[in-house]
Image (cartoon, helix red, strand yellow):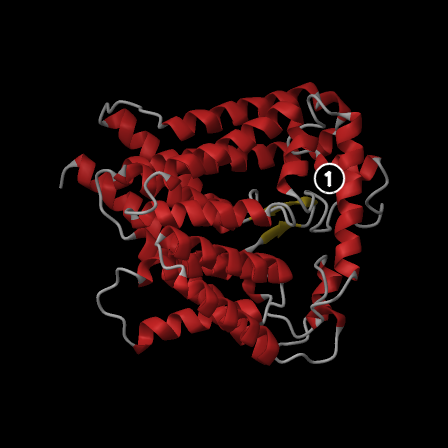
Amino acid sequence: MGMKKIFNLLLKIVFLVSLVIFPFGQFLRIELPNFPEIKLQPLDFLCFIFVFISLAKKLVLKEKFKLPELAKIMAVFLGIALFSFLINVFTVPAFSLVSSFLYFLRLFEYFLFFWSVADFLKESYLPVSTYLIFAGLAVAVLALGQYFLVPDTRFIYNLGWDEHYFRAIGSFLDPAFTALLINLSFIIWLSRSFDRKVKNIYWWSLGLIFLVSIGLSFSRLNYGVLLLSAILIFIIRKKTKLITLIVILFISMIFFLPKPAGEGVNLLRTNSVFAKLENYQLAWKIIADHPVFGVGFNNYRIAQRKYGFLSEENWQSTNAGAGADNSFLFTWATTGIFGFLTLLFLLARIMQKSILLAVKNEMALILFTSTIAIAVSSFFVNAFFYPWVLFWLMLLLAKFTAEN
């Protein structure tokens, strides 16, 4: 076996292992007792191994390094993020610098992961969308299992998470992120439903599982994302008559969902709305004081502590400390106006490149709709920088780049 085949085999193994562990989410998180700010994820480690093997392959086989256009935009964003970190390095306590810099390294790693996977897929065919559907199915099954077996998850509040009662939070311990990942799976399923030759009961059952698990999350954000994604796909595929059907199914699903007592399942709840508005106000205050270069990527936890937004008791351990409930405000607050504009340009360029091919190209349709779903979600949660969402987006981008 030649060196090239050995490298490709290793890359394939790491790639598949990363997809196997993907659905287990926060269950696999590793916390360091002496460094409560640092949370390690096996998925990050596997992405690093994939990138390392890919770079080693390039060097050993003396292959040329070619950066796709989107990778160049990502490189610009990384440069801005690193600059914002460096100019704020003396404003951050020494013990927090490691944690802050690790966030930058993670982002750097995932952007490199996009390039590495795109390069790999040009030589080795892998049904990425099929793999992601199965990963999403596992996420949905775990969420449904948790909902029926452990519906009362208020005890996780003591571990730094929000408390939930009779909501599908799954292995990510958060209904919004769990439902978003299932939504992304549903987008692939729906996009492939038009051209799929064999549509049996198992295929349609798969879609039903996605819908039910999203419904039981009681995430209003993801209800909207589900409806928007389906409508976009129907419009692009010129199946506008089906829009009425999906709206009726959507309303029926909401009507028939079990709604036990509790604020979390009340779709008219206002507590979370006011909490998000307060979160946005805090982000705007940081932006107002650091509009050009930000507080540094990612010094957001430190900034929140300085402004008194986090309590001294748990500012290091709380899971809500390192980000805002809006990826765009978070980006502006940490990297400044230039990082914010670069992120907008990156997302706009992804959508522009994919929409041009979405009518006839299945992968382009999936990428475009998924990017819209992530962008919309990023107004209400820090979706873009969530490791599993970023991993998902990088895979879709890599597959699209390799094919086009």
* Residue 62 image offset from top left, x and y in percent: 23, 23
Q: Residue at the location (67% across, 31% down)?
A: 332
* Left or right of 31 on screen, residue 51: left
Q: Amino acid at mark 1?
A: Arg
Give neighbour class at mark 1: few <14, some 14-19, many 20+ (Cα, 10 Å): many
Query: Most extreme residue toward the left, as rendered?
Result: 1
Question: Do we see residue 52 in this rendering?
Answer: no
| Residue 291, quarter of the rendered image | top right
Residue designated by label 1? 301
Question: Do we see residue 60 in this rendering?
Answer: yes
Q: Residue at the location (80% across, 47% down)?
A: 278
Q: Considering the numbered disc 1 on the image, is that residue within a helix, a strand or a loop?
A: helix
* Residue 75 image offset from top left, x and y in percent: 47, 25
Query: Most extreme residue toward the front, as rendered?
Result: 241
Q: Quadrant of the N terminus?
A: top left
Q: Residue at the location (84% across, 36% down)?
A: 307
320 and 198: which one is in front? Answer: 198
* Residue 83 image offset from top left, x and y in percent: 61, 20
Counting labels gives 1
10 and 230: which one is in front? Answer: 230
| Residue 3, quarter of the rendered image | top left
**Is 326 rendered above or below residue 296?**
below
Q: Residue at the location (70% across, 26% down)?
A: 294
* Residue 207 image offset from top left, x and y in percent: 41, 69
Q: Quadrant of the C terminus?
A: top left
